Image (cartoon, grey):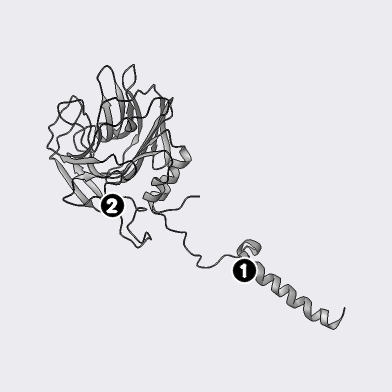
Amino acid sequence: MSASLLVAVPFALFGIVLLLCFVGCDRVFGIYAVNPPPPPFTRYSEVILGEPTLVAYWPLGEQAGETTAVDLKGGRNGTYLSQALPDDPSFPSAAAPGTLTLGQEGIVPGDRVPPFDDTSPRTTCIEVNGGYVSVPFDPALNPTTADGFTLEAWVRVEWSAGDTAATRIIMNSFDTTGGDHGYGLFAGPANNWEGAVGTPGGPVFLSGPEILFDTTNHIVLTYDGHLLRLFVNGTQTAAIAGNYQPSAQSSLFIGVGGPFLPQPRGPWVGKIQCVALYTGALPPDEVSKHAVFGNGGNAS
């Protein structure tokens, strides 16, 4: 081997090593940086608005004095309302003072204001106990039986085990004219997560796990034309068959329910944020991804 070749070969090998490290020596040699850069921060609302089946999305981030709950997707805006509500053991429903507070500290860690990094403040939410949002009837908010639907919300539970046993509704579009129609997502009087749909044979209830007090949860109810499924924090917790039939007249309520009664019933007690409705059932892996993003993580 010539002297010039003996000199050139080591330099060539050194150059190859530098090139491999440039394109990713961690993958080539199994070496990882001591302080790898953090994953890109994801703004939760951008993830939701990118879903192709999204029909309506109410972040509920309005501030004190505003009266309109804006739907960022379809323009199906709601109105903020509040009223004191009585006890009604027949529903069952607990009394509420009619509290509606906007601009509260957000409960979705992954939804922040610009510049959308993990030092940015969270977007805000509403806190209610007799306060609610009323969205006028729209056929798009009542998907067909064949299409199915998905209801999604982030909520914080702010009552206790010692409070009156009651139904506390996250969102609801239900009526009983000519039979039971519509859907509901709520906490039941036994303090467990529940979903319901109206069917030709009467309402079908889906009972999930016990709630944890003073906690924030990502709650999703899906219906695929055959099965009703309940997800808590990204995990399916219950399923039941049901022949859902949509409402043809009811408003959609957020934070209360019972629009077919003389006045609302089932007031939520706590915070609500990032409420969404989709046509069709979101796949379980997509529900899980939303839970991860909402908690400030990143999903593949």
- Residue at 14% x, 35% y is 95
Residue 190 visible to the viewer: no
Residue at far right of view: 1
- Describe the element under mark 1 as helix, strand or loop: helix
Q: From the top left corner, tell me how far across and down residue 212 is, in percent.
A: 31, 42
Q: In which quarter of the image is residue 290?
A: top left
Closer to us: mark 2 or mark 1? 1
Q: In which quarter of the image is residue 277?
A: top left
Q: Which of 248 and 154 is in front in this view?
A: 248
- Describe the element under mark 2 as helix, strand or loop: loop
* Mark 2 in CB contact with mark 1 (< 8 angstroms): no
- Residue at 45% x, 53% y is 298
Decide if residue 39 is on the left or right side of residue 71.
right
Mark 2 / mark 1, whichever is N-terminal = 1
Q: From the top left corner, tell me how far across and down residue 238 is, in percent.
A: 40, 31
Q: Alpha carbon of mark 2 to alpha carbon of mark 1: how far?
A: 41 Å
Decide if residue 238 is on the left or right side of residue 272.
right
Residue receiving disc 1: 22
Image quarter (top left, top right, bottom left or bottom right) of the N terminus: bottom right
- Residue at 33% x, 56% y is 112
Three-letter code for the amino acid on which mark 2 is drawn: Gly
Label 2 Cα neighbours within 10 Å, binned few <14 / some 14-19 / many ≥20 = many
Residue at far bottom of view: 3
Q: Is residue 251 above or below residue 298?
A: above
Q: Is residue 60 above or below residue 173?
A: below
Three-letter code for the amino acid on which mark 1 is drawn: Phe
Q: Residue 264 carries which label?
A: none
Residue receiving disc 2: 106
Q: In this view, does 25 lie above or below 230?
A: below
Label 1 Cα neighbours within 10 Å, binned few <14 / some 14-19 / many ≥20 = few
